[in-house]
Image (cartoon, rainbow, N blue to C red):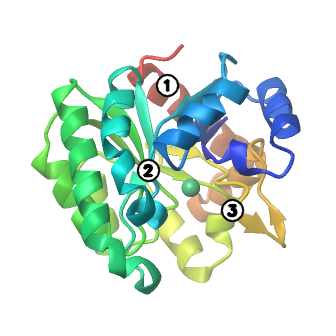
Amino acid sequence: MDFHCHLDLYPNARAVHAEAARRNAFTWLVTTSPKAFMATSRVLGNTPTVLITPGLHPEIAHERADELGLLLSQIETMPAVGEVGLDGSPRYRHSYAVQHRIFGAVVKRCRELGGRTLSIHSRRAVKDVLIELRRNPGFGTAVLHWFTGSSAELKAAKDLGCWFSIGPAAFNSASGKSLAKSLPKDRVVPESDGPFAQVDGKPVMPWSLASTAQLLAVAWAVSPREAVTLLEQNSNRLLRAMGLP
Ligand SMILES: [Zn+2]
């Protein structure tokens, strides 16, 4: 299983897609723009175990702001949305107002539609992400992908009922390893975030649940087998919440 993957952006996307479809019971392919969602659905669509969702990545929000209307209409027919969110790091600070407008509109639409599951980017912006979620009760389920906030922000996100998707690359840093210890064991699902996320210079692949489990086992002081079981149980629970088999 993989709950956050840019499958369409691997250099050999078709081959990776075929292998993910063969090896994974579920792969969530998050797209970065509404037009990319249309193109990817056309090229890679119609595989029941690969969910392709519309999104608008905060890093390109300023270039794609005119696609917001398209995104809001795509959300109507989909159980889930992503990748969406906010990025407050220095490099993307210039577009923060646009990002905020887009993310706010997306969460509001999810609420109006009775709830959706969102894969959310929150780098250096956890506080504002949580404010938007709180402002829209009934928006659905938030899955914070590759969480890198403070431990106080992690607690606030847990209290709000957020889920977390995490992959091997999150353990590259000491702070990532330490944060992983405090993730709620019953609300963590695996992700790759490939091909952007890398370990030892290689993109993480969508079938990396076992290595994520191994790293989580250390963080949680449980056996690797127990960590696999937790990830599988959580994944199945989240899939049911998303209305997927
Ligand atoms: Zn991503």
Q: CA distance from mark 3 to mark 2?
A: 16 Å
Q: Give the quadrant of ligand 1.
A: bottom right
Estimate the x, y position of residue 83 in percent, counting from the top left.
Answer: 47, 48
Up/down of 111 relative to 8, above or below: above
Labels 1 & 2 near each other (Cβ < 8 A): no
Q: Closer to the camera: disc 3 or disc 2?
A: 2
Ligand 1 under 8 Å from disc 3 Cβ: yes
Q: Is residue 104 left or right of residue 230?
A: left
The residue singled out by tag 2 in the image is 56
Please name whichever residue, 72 or 230, is drawn nearer the observer in this view of the structure.
Answer: 72
Estimate the x, y position of residue 40 in percent, counting from the top left.
Answer: 64, 34
Circle 3: residue type: Phe
Please name whichever residue, 212 or 83, is drawn nearer the observer in this view of the structure.
Answer: 83
The residue singled out by tag 1 in the image is 239
Task: First in sequence, mark 3 or 2: give its number.
Answer: 2
Labels 3 & 2 near each other (Cβ < 8 A): no
Q: Quadrant of the N terminus?
A: top right
Q: Dot 3, crowdedness within 10 Å: few (<14), some or many (≥20)? A: some
Residue at 48% from the left image edge and 70% from the top image edge: 179
The residue singled out by tag 3 in the image is 196
Q: CA distance from mark 1 to mark 2?
A: 22 Å
Residue at 28% from the left image edge and 65% from the top image edge: 98
Circle 1: residue type: Leu
Q: Closer to the camera: disc 1 or disc 3?
A: 3
